[in-house]
Image: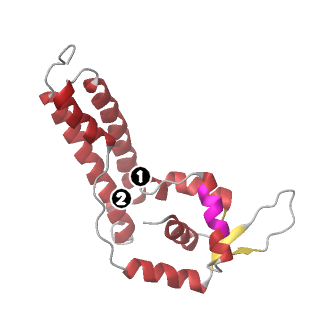
Amino acid sequence: MSLPHAILTALLEKPSSGLELTRRFDKSIGFFWSATHQQIYRELARLEDAELIRAVPQPPSRGQRKEYEVLPDGRAELRRWVAAAQDPRPVRDPLMVRVRAASVVGTEGLAAELRRHLRMHSAQLEEYRAIEERDFPAEGAADEDPLLHGVLRAGIAQESFWVGWLEQMLDELPAPEKGG
């Protein structure tokens, strides 16, 4: 995935200022594709230069607030990108390397790190489940967007995997060896 496509998606969902976009990113797309505020503002400028988005004229105010909307070429680019083939990305997680390294140098300190990750993944899982309960209640199933719910279910499944795997690793973790 690329940041420009994430931004085009967010702007098609709702035209926004840069600040509004960064706040929305922190609460939605940012769960799956993170970006700093500076990266988002730089990409907005690039998208505007490429004539994929434009700043909508705003009433005069004290600040230089710009609200952006997607132009037809931006929508076409997003459609092209959605239809393009892309291979899955391999997992690249430092925790996996740490666990493997612990098998050769010993497990001292690893349990604490696994518990820390377990707390973080458990909290994220709780947050996703709360979002699902709020945004996709069982009684509203006919109205829901199955694609948006599908992305959320993927997040729930991913966090459920991590919680289960971390619990299993903690149960199976050998005692630390001193001086290994």
Chain part drawn in magenta: 39-45
Circle 1 residue: 131
Depicted 34 relative to depicted 4: above or below: above
Quarter of the image with the C terminus in it: top left
Depicted 157 relative to depicted 118: above or below: below
In the picture, measured across the screen, residue 137 lies left or right of residue 97, that is: right
Q: Looking at the picture, which amino acid does disc 2 mark?
A: Leu
Depicted 97 relative to depicted 9: above or below: above
Residue 44: within the magenta? yes
Q: Residue drawn at (30%, 52%), measured in percent from left and top?
A: 156
CA gap between label 2 and label 1 equals: 8 Å
Compare residues 113 and 149 and report the one nearer the observer. 113
Circle 2 residue: 152
Quarter of the image with the N terminus in it: bottom left
Report the disc number at residue 167.
Answer: none
Residue 55: within the magenta? no
In the picture, measured across the screen, residue 6 lies left or right of residue 42, that is: left
Identify the mark nearer the N-term, 2 or 1: 1
Res 162 quadrant in image: top left
Decide: few, some or many residues near mark 1? Use Cα within 10 Å; few <14, some 14-19, many ≥20. Answer: some
Res 109 quadrant in image: top left
Assign the magenta stretch its main secondary structure.
helix
Q: x%, y% of residue 102?
A: 21, 30
Q: x%, y% of residue 83?
A: 37, 81
Q: x%, y% of residue 16?
A: 65, 65
| Badge 1 element | helix
Q: x%, y% of residue 25?
A: 54, 56
Q: Would you say the residues marked 2 and 1 are in contact, meaning their CB atoms lie under 8 Å apart?
A: yes
Q: Residue drawn at (23%, 33%), measured in percent from left and top?
A: 101
Decide: few, some or many residues near mark 2? Use Cα within 10 Å; few <14, some 14-19, many ≥20. Answer: many
